[in-house]
Amino acid sequence: MIIKRNIWLLLVLMATLVLNGCGAIAAMVVNPSTDKMLDYNVSVENQSLLQTYSSKKYRINIGKFTDASESNKTVKCRLMTSVHPPKDESYAKYIEHAFQKEFTDAKLYNPRSNVTISATINEIHGGTVYGDAYWSFDLTLASSNGVSYRFKSTYEYESSISAAYACSDMYKTFPLALQKLIHDAVTQPKFARLLQK
């Protein structure tokens, strides 16, 4: 009887951890691969947008992307599990590489260009509340020609009640959120002015 009761209590504890999600333990029990953020892949839509500029012979260099705040360097899932970019990169460096990859594939990037675009990451937020999961960015893009603009981008996605799967979804959706961030950056009215000498 005592053994059965202990097993029952263990099952209740496991269900509570999974459903109410104090992340790290639940993640290890249910899904040990939640700490894998994928490398960034270019978006077909972004490539189409950027190629309209490369076809006009615009060429730009990518400068440094920096964090405006220390709080941007750590994003938590369910207030417990830290969500890290791959290869021990900072979020700023990961975003910088994403922009560079998109611009390179669109033949817009040239490290010898006289025009350099850099960025300040003002804020990064991630939320995994069931029914209201999102990544949000507040970014300032600046060109060496003196033009700059600040904008916000939000990517919403479906999350899970389970902390383990919610954290896994958070990792998986970050590259998709960056694709939308770059799309939102490129479709800003001032974007073309960033590229001008």
Image (cartoon, rainbow, N blue to C red):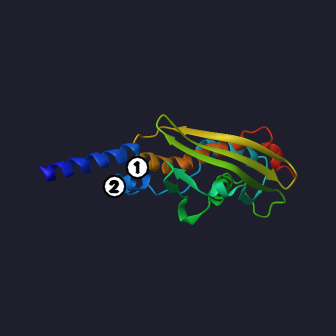
Q: At label 1, which amino acid type do we have?
A: Ala
Left or right: where 4 falls relative to 94: left
| Residue 178 horizontal/vertical position (percent) | 61, 48
Q: Where in the figure is residue 95, as x and y percent of width and height? A: 64, 55
In-image side of 153 versus 26 (left or right): right
**Residue 191 seen in the figure:** yes
Q: Is residue 128 left or right of residue 12?
A: right
Question: Quick check: 18 above or below 32?
Answer: above
Q: Report which residue position mark 2 lands on.
A: 29
- What residue sits 81% from the left and 49% below the top? 195
Tell me the SS state at disc 2. Answer: helix
Residue located 54% across and 58% down the image: 84
Closest to the observer, 88 or 110? 88
The first of marks 2 and 1 along the sequence is 2
Closer-to-camera residue (33/2) = 2
Residue 101 visible (yes or no): no
Give the residue type that dot 2 points to: Val
Residue lying farthest to the front in this orientation? 2
Pointer 2 with pointer 1, Cβ within 8 A: yes
Callout 1 crowding tier (Cα within 10 Å): few <14, some 14–19, many ≥20: many
Residue 29: x and y, percent? 33, 55
Q: Is residue 26 left or right of residue 179?
A: left
Q: Quadrant of residue 135?
A: top right
Looking at the rendering, which quadrant does residue 153 occupy? top right
Q: Residue at x 82, y 53 (%)?
A: 143
Question: Dot 2 surroundings within 10 Å: few (below 14), some, or many (20 or more)?
Answer: few
For disc 1, the marked residue is 164
